[in-house]
Amino acid sequence: MTTPFHYEPGEARGPVPPPECPAHGLGTGPGGVRRLYGPEAEQDPHGLYDKLRAEHGTVAPVLLHGDVPAWLVLGHSENLHMTRTPSQFSRDSRRWRALQDGSVAPDHPLAPIFTWQPICVFADGATHERQRGAVTDSMARIDTRGVRRHVNRYSNRLVNDFCREGRTDLVGAFAERLPMMVMCAILGMPEEYNDRMVQAARDMTRGTATAVESNAYVLAALNRLVERRRREPADDFATWLVEHPAAMNDKEVAEHLRLILIASYEATTNLIANVLRMVLTDPRFRARLSGGHMTVPEAVEQTLWDEPPFTAVFGRWAVGDTELGGQRIKAGDALIVGIAPANTDPLVRPDLDANMEGNRAHLAFSGGPHECPGQDIGRAIADVGVDALLMRLPDLELAVDESELRWVGNLMGRHLVELPAEFAPRSPQDDREPPSMGKPNPARQDWEVQSAVRHMAPTPVRAPAPSEPAATAAGAAPAGVTVAVDGTVDGRAGEGSPAGMIPQQRRPAAPARLWRVVTRWWNGY
């Protein structure tokens, strides 16, 4: 099947309506080609993908802002082929024919995304290998266990800020803040974390009037970091990039730090928000998570299939005339990696309700040589952050009707604006230690969330005789300390799975009470 554009970049098409013009509210542009911007694309992107797939197959012509033509790749295998074949589909935006003939102006709304920079995402071949090698080698030096400890501590610090209130916005108070706290620490500038940094990182990717100013704020902080690490090396990501044999100059290091900070922040923020939304709005998702049939990492993986942090990535540019998905692609054409539509490709996923946890064949982190190098760090932040939040607040409930949730969208993704939630007020915990399991909320005892292993069948426990020294020792254990089945005391409350761990009982009727509790837990009550 061939569906060529009805016009070419640079061809006279008449005046293009300004962004605020009502004409941009229409779903189609010149020649009946559908627009990948405007209300329809922002409010119901999945509906738009379905229409494009039905009309054109796995590769569809679309219009970007200003009705600039491009190709949206919808098929899973077609996206893999495109991302894995840089000899045919380059990341160098200077190949874009619309840029060469002036069809796309320097102040185009998508200019911050496609404007070429001397960094690895716009490079191919040897240059890409040199720059990407520095990034991946530095990523490999990150202590993942240490990151998880930081995430756990920072999560509890954030929960402490609102746990007394009984109500919060999980996007603004948690999802938008946790990734920035962690990434600033990883890069080597924890002192730069503040409200302004969070706002700037969110703002600079949305094409607002203040995006340039926000970008300058972030880059200034990173330039200071690079200058400091040239003088004073430390055990952090910035130092590893500075000292890498790739011999990046200061500008290259700062630009790559910005890329890593913003890409990881945006992706992880959206991922956390999407997981929490699924927990609060999808009863089946919540029941499987709370009932032990799905771990938090599996819940994150399911969300990466259903609601990937980025719905699309712009772009690739055809090196020469070729064919993809039955469409004739000309040299210099722009193509878009369709992450969300690829994840719902009927050939790969005929049943959208099927459980996908544990399956990492999704394209949430793209693919090929430019696949996201920090995806494991993003997963760790989301896994531990969501786990810690639900451990502290197991009775979280959506505070508004689901229909009241608002989204903002653009070419790259759809972002949840707010996620109001309510819960029983609690006292803050010591954020210097991992969270304890604590006592379940009296109103709800159906939560059991863990990150490492599935639930195991509970082990029967013999009621200790009054004369046994273990009973005395366990009875003297302070609040929040867990007593193992073998009678040993474990002060690392909240770490790992509670399976096989129960509170020490001291009264003769303990076995009966214990089995009632275990039975209710095992049945999901």
Image (cartoon, grey):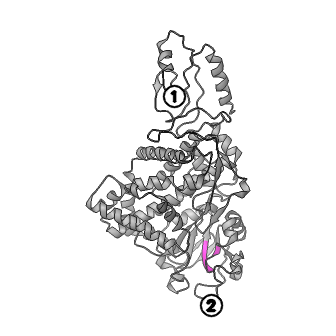
- Give the vertical position of 381 relative to 441 (above or below): below
Residue 254 appears left or right of 483: left
Mark 1 or mark 2: name the one nearer the start of the chain. 2
Name the residue beneath numbered marker 2. 12
Is residue 303 visible in the rendered image? The answer is: no
> Circle 1 — which element?
loop
- From this viewpoint, which residue is outermost toward the top? 467
Instruction: Give x and y (percent) for residue 36.
Output: 64, 72
Residues at badges 1 and 2 in contact (C-beta under 8 Å)? no
Residue 390 appears left or right of 398: left
Q: Is residue 65 magenta?
A: yes
Which residue is rendered at x = 57% and y = 36% of the image? Answer: 454
Could you tell me the amino acid type at mark 2?
Answer: Ala
Residue in the foreground of this view, choosing between 255 and 489: 489
- From this viewpoint, which residue is outermost toward the left? 231
Instruction: Give x and y (percent) for residue 327.
Output: 63, 74
